[in-house]
Image: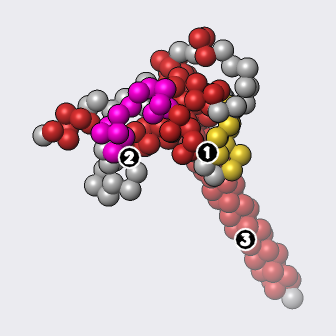
Amino acid sequence: MARKKISNQVPSFDELIIPTVKALVELGGSGSNEEINTKVYELHNISDEIINIPHGENGTVSEVDYRLAWSKTYLKKFGLLENSSRGIWSLINTAVDISTLDSFEIVKYVREQDKNNKQNKKMSKSSEELIQETKNEVDYSEEWKEKLLNILYNILILDKIMDT
């Protein structure tokens, strides 16, 4: 029961979005996951007790680090971060004005984009199905042409046989 109570004290990923940007600014615009996470712990005053709460059953990563990973993903999808190599993140614009950032708006924007991407995939799948149906109809139309040619060919052969 105590673990659950402590777990509720872990900042949510959206609460960690702005501290993540602040950490990157303080780190000079880029850093490794470990450097960024450590700086966020410091900026957000996250206690060791909270930092050591494992995520899930395996506990290979802490809950805070897991949520920080989501924060970075949202910032990347929003267009503020990039990760040029595994585990290294950098601000796209190092002159970002943190005071103008709103984590609620970032989350809202990313979720809308994801929703639109899913709808586009559904639409493109529907288009692919339509193309396949059309292809099947074309195949069918080619089939009747082939049958007609066979009938005409047979008539021609029959006519030649009758003439001889």
Q: Nearer the viewer, mark 1 or mark 3?
A: 1
Q: Earlier in the sequence, mark 1 or mark 3?
A: 1
Confirm whether residue 35 shows in the render.
yes
In magenta segment, residue 51: yes
- 3D distance between C-alphas at marks 3 and 2: 75 Å
The overriding secondary structure of the stretch rendered in magenta is helix
Which image quadrant for residue 52? top left
Reading the image, the residue beneath label 3 is 151
Residue 33: horizontal and vertical position, in percent?
56, 44
Q: For the view shown, which residue lies furthest in the left direction?
A: 1
Reading the image, the residue beneath label 2 is 62
If the image is split into quadrants, where does the C terminus sit?
A: bottom right
Q: Nearer the viewer, residue 84 or 132?
A: 84
Q: Earlier in the sequence, mark 3 or mark 2?
A: 2
Residue 34: horizontal and vertical position, in percent?
54, 45
**Labelled pair 1, 2 in contact (Cβ < 8 Å):** no
Reading the image, the residue beneath label 1 is 32
Counting labels gives 3
Compared with 37, 132 (above or below) is: below
For label 2, count other residues whose C-alpha is less than 10 Å away and answer few (under 14), some (14-19) or many (20+).
Answer: some
- Residue drawn at the location 79% of the way across and 74% of the way down: 153
Magenta residues (range): 40-52
If the image is split into quadrants, where does the N terminus sit?
A: top left
Amino acid at pointer 2: Ser
Q: Nearer the viewer, mark 3 or mark 2?
A: 2
- 3D distance between C-alphas at marks 1 and 2: 16 Å
Residue 22 shown left or right of residue 157 in the figure: left
Amino acid at pointer 1: Ser
Which disc, if any, is residue 158?
Answer: none
- Residue drawn at the location 38% of the way across and 46% of the way down: 62
Q: For the view shown, which residue lies furthest in the top direction?
A: 100
Amino acid at pointer 3: Ile
